């Protein structure tokens, strides 16, 4: 009898210990997913924040920290002389979503020519554009400059229904025709263009709302979907 009582007491103690350790964790609600493509915040300055990056404010170094990856920084020199600096991240995984990303860096115009001249390696792409590897001192300077655009390429396909559910009804839709039609869903208030493709994966482009013309300028001759 005494043995049964002792075993019963021990069992109760063990059960109480297990519940004391694990029950609080089970009762705590899981934290909501963060840094998802449709979680776009407006800041007090009128800028937008997505993936933990505030466009126009977060430096490239801060953006790399938010994406948890170091980017490959390149200066692109177009045949017409236009030069831009972009930072490519091959693998971004936030809240379980995998993607590739290209960050546009706001480099002063006066810096581009000297950076091009100091480039340590250049290769020509099929389009005729030059891909220039920056000198170490220029690379360090670029990482202290703000990011002004994000091109986000998810590894999964997004249907029009999913896009509308997450981002809402677009202010305008424009459809590029051809062998691979692409429809652009435009959200000026968010500074967002979602390019929806029937055959390829979708591409999301984020800019400052004040710079939204950067996204619409190339689409001026593309028909509006009524």
Image: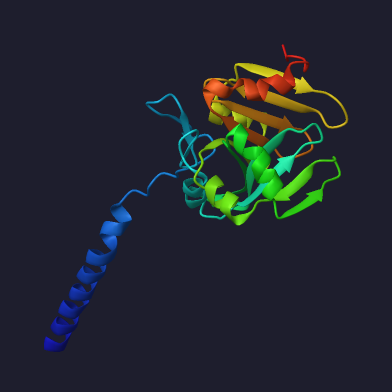
Q: Residue furthest left?
A: 2
Residue 13, position as x, y percentages in the image = 18, 74
Q: Nearer the viewer, residue 45 or 96?
A: 45
Q: Nearer the viewer, residue 173 or 87?
A: 87
Residue 167 falls in which quadrant of the image? top right
Left or right: where 184 falls relative to 168: right
Left or right: where 196 falls relative to 31: right
* Residue at image point 61% right, 34% down: 110
Left or right: where 34 falls relative to 75: left
Residue 82 falls in which quadrant of the image? top right
Image quadrant containing the C terminus: top right
Q: Is residue 181 above or below residue 76?
A: above
Residue 56, position as x, y percentages in the image = 49, 33
Q: Nearer the viewer, residue 92 or 28?
A: 92
* Residue at image point 77% right, 36% down: 78
Does residue 90 show up? Answer: yes
* Residue at image point 49% right, 49% down: 61
Residue 55, position as x, y percentages in the image = 50, 34
* Residue at image point 26% right, 58% down: 24
Image quadrant containing the N terminus: bottom left
Residue 208, position as x, y percentages in the image = 53, 27
């Amino acid at each position: 009898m005494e043995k049964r009582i002792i075993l019963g007491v021990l069992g109760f103690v063990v059960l109480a210990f297990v519940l004391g350790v694990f029950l609080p964790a089970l009762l705590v609600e899981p934290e909501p997913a963060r840094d998802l493509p449709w979680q776009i915040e407006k800041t007090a300055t009128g800028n937008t924040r997505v993936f933990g990056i505030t466009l126009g404010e977060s430096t490239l170094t801060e953006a790399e920290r938010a994406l948890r990856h170091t980017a490959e920084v390149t200066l692109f020199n177009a045949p017409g002389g236009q030069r831009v600096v972009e930072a490519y991240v091959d693998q971004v995984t936030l809240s379980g979503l995998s993607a590739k990303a290209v960050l546009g860096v706001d480099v002063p115009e006066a810096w581009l020519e000297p950076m091009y001249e100091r480039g340590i390696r250049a290769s020509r792409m099929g389009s005729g554009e030059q891909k220039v590897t920056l000198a170490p001192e220029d690379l360090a300077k670029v990482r202290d400059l703000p990011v002004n655009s994000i091109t986000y390429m998810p590894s999964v396909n997004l249907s029009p229904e999913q896009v509308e559910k997450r981002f809402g009804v677009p202010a305008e839709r424009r459809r590029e025709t051809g062998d691979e039609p692409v429809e652009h869903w435009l959200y000026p208030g968010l500074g967002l263009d979602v390019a929806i493709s029937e055959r390829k994966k979708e591409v999301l482009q984020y800019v400052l709302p004040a710079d939204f013309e950067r996204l619409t300028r190339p689409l001026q001759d593309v028909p509006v979907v009524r």
